[in-house]
Amino acid sequence: MKQQIRQIISKAVREHSLSRDDIILILSCENSHDYELFQAADSVRRQYVGDAVHLRGIIEFSNYCSRNCLYCGLRCANKNLRRYRMDADAIYKAAASAVSIGYRTIVLQSGEDSTYDADAIADICRRLKKLGVAVTLSLGERPYEEYRLWHKAGADRYLIKHETADPELYKKLHPGKTLASRIDCLRQLSELGYQVGSGCMVGLPGQTIETLADDLLLLKELDVEMAGIGPFIPHPSTPLAEYPPGPVDMTLKMLAVARLLLPLAHLPATTALFTIAGDGRERALCSGANVVMPNVTPSEYKNLYEIYPNKSRAEKTMPVAGRRQLENMITALGRTVAGDQGHSPKRKFSRAVS
Ligand code: SAM
Ligand code: SF4
């Protein structure tokens, strides 16, 4: 068994592909092999994307959401949450302030909030591009024409996780929605020229090792530029309040296998992992991750974007001090902080922004 796992890992290091059975075997094997897996992922990370860690400043500009995902504190049925929206000027100001302390990518994230119409988002993209940054959007499922308009307005990347590759589980967790339409969005975004990010949660109620293997195979099939893999964290005001959080070790294993399968992808050390494990960022950075997404939302809104509990506690440091702490942590790992916009090494960019 030991020898077999070792052989599977070294084959993945060479070929960046794994069968479903091999992934299941790696994910279900004893802890004694984790170290070898993490080391292998770390060496593939170093070889393909180098030692630089990309810092993306995330602005969570609205916690209104029309969807009702069972796991998320922003779901529309949660009446225990004070809702907020930032206007275009406030978003611009937060982004300019993040740029002034060194961020070269701004991620705009929100619930599915159609109050911001297509033109409003396009205007915000155009304004942010003038700050000389890469712009990532994470606004959920929107019509193709809107994605097209925003890409023309300068949006470089789009993050929309598939959440789980099990269509039945997806349906249960997302009332009235389907995995197929989520995947359609991912394909449309890629076709439009976005650098696309997907990903999944680990430890969702009803998830199995087989489902997790399918998550990784779906990421590989979609050939995503980014993959966010983080633990599920139960929120007390949701129907999943009583379930346990996703396991840290399984999250790290998923991340490491994702690095073996997608050597050129940007893989974040997620805030969710950091929220449930104080050393989660460091451990993720040593298991294949090369991105961190610090929160640069103005402090009056930070604790209202409560997708899961204790998120704002994990993000409590103010932007300047937080960035300094992060830079020190990255340097202590023998890594560097990237100074560029951190586009996907998979794609070359040269396009006019209209
Ligand atoms: N509304 C957009 C969407 O769903 O794509 C973007 C915002 S949503 C809050 C961003 C991510 O938060 C989701 O993709 C989901 O994976 C994550 N999330 C939500 N609730 C969570 C929970 N309870 N535990 C861990 N991650 C969660
Ligand atoms: Fe809304 Fe996104 Fe939360 Fe689902 S995960 S309820 S779409 S904010």
Image (cartoon, rainbow, N blue to C red):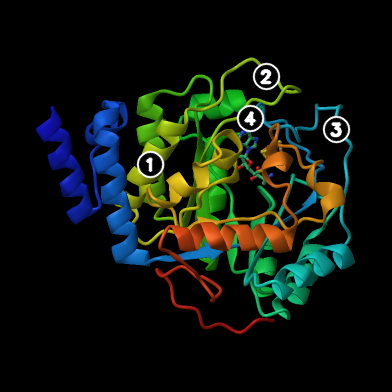
The residue indicated by pointer 4 is 174
At 30% from the left edge and 26% from the top edge, which residue is drawn? 28
Which callout, 2 or 1, points at the residue further toward the start of the chain? 1
Mark 4 or mark 3, which is nearer the start of the sequence?
3
State how far apart marks 2 and 1 are (Cα).
26 Å
Q: What amino acid is at disc 3?
A: Leu
Question: Mark 3 or mark 1, which has the lower sequence index?
Answer: 3
Residue on which disc 2 sits: 241
Camera sees residue 272: yes
Ligand 2 lies under 8 Å from the Cβ of mark 3: no
| Residue that badge 3 annotates | 81
User: What residue is at 67 percent from the left and 19 percent from the top?
Assistant: 241
Residue 231 location (% of width, % of height): 53, 34
First-in-chain label (4 vs 2): 4
Q: Residues within 10 Å of mark 3 (few under 14, many from 20)?
A: some
For residue 342, side relative to residue 114 (left or right): left
| Mark number displayed over residue 173 | none
Q: Would residue 30 be found to the left or right of residue 170 on screen?
A: left
Quadrant that contains the N terminus:
top left
* Three-letter code, disc 2: Ala
Q: Secondary structure at mark 4?
A: loop
Q: Looking at numbered disc 4 in the image, what kind of residue is underneath it?
A: His
Left or right: 319 in relation to 335: right
Q: Is residue 57 visible?
A: no
Check disc 1 and report the residue beneath it.
Answer: 216
SS under mark 2? loop
Does the CB distance between marks 3 and 2 fall below 8 Å? no
| Of marks 2 and 1, the one in the foreground | 2
Tally the numbered discs.
4
